[in-house]
Structure formats: C-alpha cells, structure tokens
C-alpha cells in the first residue's frame, strides 16, 4: 500500500525526516563515496548512482523509497527510473544541501555536504 498519493514524487527534507523517523520509507543516498563520507543521513543506505540498477532487486518493492543526492538532480533520475519500474519512489527536494539548510542532522559529528 502506497504511503503517498500519486504523485508526489518530490518530498521536502522535513517530510522525509518525519517519514524516516517513523520507519515508513527506505532512504537511499546515490552520491559518490567521498560525498557520503563527508556527511550523511544516519542509517540511510548508500548505493552510488552507477550501481543502482545492479542493486535494484535488493530494494524492497513493498515499501516507499526516497532517493537523495547533493542537490536533487541525480536522485531525480533514480526516482524516475524506479517509478518506471513500478516502485513507490520519491525524490528529496533540494537533496542533502536542503536537508542541512533545514537544520536536520548529519553524521558523523561535524559532517558536511561535500561539493560535487
């Protein structure tokens, strides 16, 4: 059962944080390893964009999935591809930059949004 109406494919960082905290979504970071190391959302799964297709079967089709990157462009591509494959997929608007600007937490301590 979808948690969201159709669309929205775009979710604000605040909405993602709320859904993530309640365990209602899978959260996947599609950034490069150096970006992920610099700062990330605690507990989010890291699958680089170029590996996403080969990892698709490991993503639960029965739960909504939210993709994010630094600004939202790469994760928008992932969202489109997964929606086309009948996943309940969504993009975090503004990416990790918007998450950090909203004052939402990053790990590790002192974590930051690395430039692409």
Image: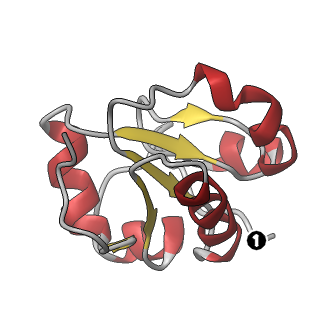
Q: Which residue is mark 1?
A: 115
Using the image, determine if residue 112 lies above or below residue 10: above
Horizontal side, residue 86 vs residue 62: left or right? right
Q: Position of residue 17 (x, y in %)?
A: 24, 53
Where does residue 31 sit, x and y in percent of width and height? 72, 53
Q: Determine whether, in the image, residue 107 is placed left or right of residue 63.
A: right
Q: Nearer the viewer, residue 8 or 24?
A: 8
* Residue 56, x across and y down, in percent: 67, 32
Q: Is 46 placed left or right of 110 in the picture?
A: right
- Image point 32% across, 70% down: which residue? 11
Q: Residue drawn at (30%, 40%), measured in percent from left and top?
A: 25
State the image quarter where residue 70 is shown.
bottom right
Query: Element at badge 1?
Result: loop
**Residue nearest the observer in this picture, 68 or 56:** 56
Q: Of residues 56 and 34, which is closer to you in this image?
A: 56
Q: Quadrant of the N terminus?
A: top left
Horizontal side of residue 102 vs 85, given as left or right: left
Q: Is residue 58 above or below residue 74?
A: above
Residue at left 39%, top 50%?
88
> How many marks overall?
1
């Amino acid at each position: 059962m979808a948690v969201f109406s159709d669309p929205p494919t775009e979710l604000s960082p605040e909405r993602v944080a709320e859904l993530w905290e309640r365990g209602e979504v899978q959260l996947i970071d599609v950034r490069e390893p150096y970006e992920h190391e610099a700062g990330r959302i605690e507990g989010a799964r890291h699958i680089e964009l170029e590996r996403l297709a080969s990892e698709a079967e490991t993503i639960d089709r029965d739960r909504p999935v939210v993709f994010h990157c630094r600004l939202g462009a790469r994760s928008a591509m992932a969202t489109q591809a997964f929606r086309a494959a009948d996943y309940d997929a969504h993009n975090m608007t503004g990416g990790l930059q918007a998450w950090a600007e909203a004052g939402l937490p990053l790990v590790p301590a002192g974590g930051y949004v690395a430039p692409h």
